[in-house]
Amino acid sequence: LSSCAPLFRQIYQLKNAQAIFHSHGIMCVMACALAEMQGNKNEFKISHLEMIKGIEGHGYHDELVIPIIENKSSEADLEDTLVAAMKDYPKSTSVLVRKHGIFVWSSNWEKNKIQCECLHYIFETALNLAKMGNNEKPICSLEKKQRKIILLDIEGTITPISFVKDVLFPYAYNNVDSYIKLNRKSKTIQKLILEIVACSRNSSNPKEPKINANSDNFNDELINDVCENIRWNIENDKKVPPMKTLQGFIWEEAYKEGKIKGLLFEDVPKALHDWSKNFRICMYSSGSRKAQQLLPSHT
């Protein structure tokens, strides 16, 4: 067994964690050093950073506090101090080990992967901001007059990644066939179908289902080939523009019929309302413009 086995067992028992990652990333070591230089030897603290949203139980305005424990000659010897840190910091989903790395846990591996990616981003950002002499508030004030636009993403910024992955994508995957067959006479949908056919035939990916049916008329054979291609692209999260546009139309119908409802992070509506008084709010996403507009307007 790994020398970390006793530590994993304690995290599993105390936190009911189903996924535990242990990283030796250099940014974890540097984050501990930065905290000590700033007079916080036992804690890494940061707030007002967008990626804090990726840490379970935290939002943009929350202070992220991660306990730091001292390293030992063997990882198994960290057990007592790790347990004490978890009990002293019940909200934390991670513990830093000075000159060593970090332990991070969650209810499943996907959520934990997001946390790890966000933590490494947070640590690197904190270090770079410290180099710039900004050790207190790691983001500039939005009240400065020269800032006129706030540019936002969708996934993980205004809505949970899980909403897109577990709600929107599966709905489009399961309903693309019936939607296209119902709307096949629409000139707009026909144009999208032909664009999807063209993208498929220009693709060099051998795994992508090819659309071999005659595209001169929009019969069942063509529709079936197109739908198979679309489902493959959804499964593999491909950024095919006409498919993304079609997804927007499918979701629009679902929103209007109440089959799905938009989901925003708790602090997003107020932030959008406040920012809109002084700034133009824009979205930058691989999704279609329609999809970007539908989500916040159907919550």
Image (cartoon, grey):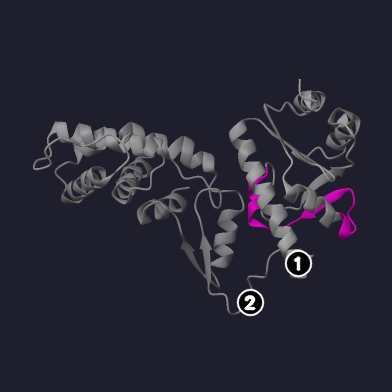
Q: Name the residue under label 1.
A: 131
Q: Name the amino acid type tagged 1.
A: Lys
Residue lying furthest left: 216
Q: What element carries label 1?
A: helix
Magenta segment includes 211: no
Which residue appears at 90% of the width and 36% of the height?
72
Which residue appears at 71% of the width and 28% of the height?
17
The magenta stretch is 36-55
- Mark closest to the chain's N terminus, 1 or 2: 1
Observer-nearest of 198 and 285: 198
Q: Mark 2 points at which residue?
A: 144
Magenta segment includes 50: yes
- Separation of marks 1 and 2 at Cα, in angstroms: 22 Å
Q: In this view, does 149 lie to the left or right of 9?
A: left
Does 149 sit above or below residue 183? below
Does 110 sit above or below residue 204? above
Q: What element carries label 2?
A: loop
Does 36 sit above or below residue 86? below
Q: In this view, does 285 lie to the left or right of 21?
A: left
